[in-house]
Image (cartoon, coloured by chain):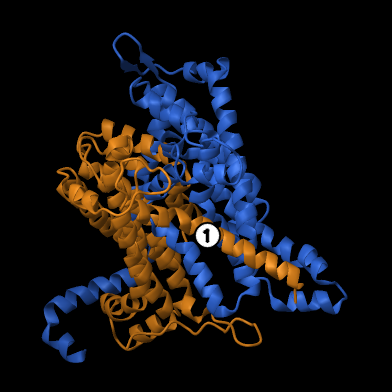
Chain colours: A orange, B blue
Amino acid sequence: MEGSAARWFFRLMTLFVLAFLYIPLAIVVLYAFNKTRTASWPPDLWTTEWFSQAWQDPSLKPALFNSIKAGIAATTLALILGTLASFAVHRFSFFGRNTISFALVLPIALPGIVTALALNSMVEAVPFISFGLPAIIVGHATFCVVVVYNNVIARLRRTSDSFIEASMDLGADGVQTFRYVTLPSMRTALLAGALLAFGLSFDEIVVTIYLSGTESTLPLWIFNNLQRPTNRPIVNVVAMVVLLLSLIPVYIAQRLAGEGPIGRKERSPEGMPVAPLEEAGPG
Amino acid sequence: MAVTASTSAPPKGLRARLSASLFRHPKGRLGLILSAPLAWMVLVYLVSLALLLATSFWTLDPLTSTIDKTWGLQNYQTIIDGSTYWRITLRTLTMAIQVTAADLILAFPIAYYAARMAKPRIRGIVTLLVVIPLWANYLIRVFAWKTLLSGGGPVDALLSAIGFGNVSLAGTRWAVWITFTYLWLPFAILPIYAALERVPPSFVEASSDLGAHTGMTFRKVIFPLAIPGIVAGSIFTFSLTLGDYLTPTLVGKDLFLGNAISSLTGTANNKPLAAAIAVIPIVIVIIYLSLAKRTGAFEAL
C-alpha cells in the first residue's frame, strides 16, 4: 500500500529504535565482565571476579530478601484490595463509582516524589506504622492496587454474567459460585495482576527511599552503591543478574497472554480482527 | 455438589442464610466488598496527600528545626518571590517537553510499522521487544546509561569516532535528556501502537476508494485517529519526567523540581517548603491532563 521508500523508512526507524532500546542493556551485560573499575571504551574483558565480590557483599542479600518480602506482602494486599474494588465497581452502581478508578490510579499518576513525601508524612504522623519494612509494604501496596484492579475489571467486563446466573440457578450459593465459577474464570487476570504488582514493588525506589528508615531493598542497594564509583563493577554484575531474572516474568506474561485475549489478536487474512471468543467458562 | 451440601448441613445452613440475606441486600454486599479498598485508599493515601498539602501551609522554625503548625502562605511566598524555583520549574518543564518530543518522534514510526505494516508474527515480536525493557529495573536502565555516558565511555568514544573530537556528555543536560528519552520510550510507543492498530481497515479502504492517495489517507484518516494515542503517550513521558529526580541525580548535575524537593527533605529538613514545591508538579500535571482529556486521550490510556 505505502510506497517502498516509506516502507524502508519505517523499517529502518524500527530497527534504530530497537537498537536504542537494547544496546544499553547489552552494555550492562558486557561491562559485567570488565576488568577495570571504570567504564572506558573498549572494555577490558574477561573477568568474573566482580561476581564473587558481589556474592560476598554483606549488605546485598539482606536487601534482596527485604525486596522479596515487601514484594510478596504488597502483592497479597494489592490482590485483595484490587479484586474487591473491581468487583464493587463492576457489580454495583453507587455514588462516587467513577472516582474509584481515579483515586486508585493517583498513587502512580502523581510524580513519585509526591506520593513518597505524602506517605512519609503519614508514617511520621501515625504511631502504629514504623519506617522500615512495614511502611514499605503499606506504600507499595497502595500503588500496586491499581494494576490488579485494572486487570481484574478488564476480565470481569469480558466475562459473561450468564455463567454466574446459571450457577445460581443450579442451586449454588454465592460462596460456591465465587469459588467454582468466578474465581477460575479470573485466574489468569489475577496472576497477571500479581505479576505486575510484584514487578512494580520489586522495582520501586522513590517511595522506598522515603519509607525505608534504616532498612534496605535491592533497588536501594543499587542506588546507594551507584553513588560510590569504586563499587561500579559489583553494581554492574548485580544489574546484569537482575536484568536476566526479569526475563522470567516476561516469559510468564507471554504464556498468560497466549492463553488470554492477546493471543487471539492474530488477524484473519482479510485484516479484520478475529471476533474475540467469550472467556472460556470453568471446566 | 449435592452430596457435600447435605453432609455439611449445619455450616451450609448458616452460609446459605448469609448468602441469601446478602443477595436480598445489595447495599450490604456492596459495603462488604467496598469497605476494605475504600478505607485503604482514603486512610492511607488521600489522608497522606491532605497531610502533605497541610504541611505546605506550615513553617519550619529555623532555630529548633521543628514544624510550626500555624497556617500561612509563607512557603508559597518564598517560591514566588525568589528566582530559584522559577528557574528550576522552567528547566524541568523544558526537559519534560524535550523528552516528550524526542519520545514521540522515535515512537511513532516503530508503532506505525508494528501496527500497520508488519506481518502478524513480526508485529508480535516487535511489541514484545518494546515491552521487555519495561520489566527491567528502572535503576538498571539508568545505570546502563551512566555506563554508556561515563567519561571516556562508549558514547564519548563513538562521538570522537564520528568526528566530534574530545567531547564528553558525562554529567551534561544532554545525558539527562537521552536517559529520560530512553526510560519512557516504551510508554510512548504502546498507546500509539494501540491507537494505530484500532484504525478500521474499512476507513482506509473508503479513503482510497474516494480517490485519496496513500499520503493523503495517512494525513487525513490514520494520523488524526492516532492523536489520542499520541497524547496518551505524551502524558506518560511528560509527567514521568516532571516527577523524576533520580535520573538527574545519577547522570546529570542540574537541579530539577524533584531534586529541589528531595534536597529540602534531606539535609535541610524543611518539609513545609518541600511540600509547597511538590504542589508545582501536581498543578502542572493536572493542567496537562485537563488539556489532554479534550483530545479523548483517556480512552487510549
User: What residue would you read off at disc 1?
Assistant: A19
In the rendered image, residue B38, in percent from the top left (x then y), is placed at 36, 51
State the residue in front, B152 or A109. Answer: B152
State the residue in front, A180 or A217. Answer: A217
Quarter of the rendering containing residue A207:
top left
State the residue in front, A138 or B173. Answer: B173
Q: Residue at x 17, y 49 (%)?
A: A61
Which amino acid, mark 1? Ala
State the residue in front, B293 or B148. Answer: B148
In the rendered image, residue B53, in percent from the top left (x then y), is placed at 43, 30
Quadrant where the image shows the C terminus of chain A: bottom left
Q: Residue at x 50, y 29 (%)?
A: B254
In the image, farthest residue toward the bottom:
B3
Q: SS for tag 1?
A: helix
In the image, residue A126 sits, relative to residue A154, either above or below, namely above
Q: Residue at x 15, y 47 (%)?
A: A56
Q: Is residue A15 left or right of residue B171?
A: right
Could one spot residue B296 in this view of the protein?
A: yes
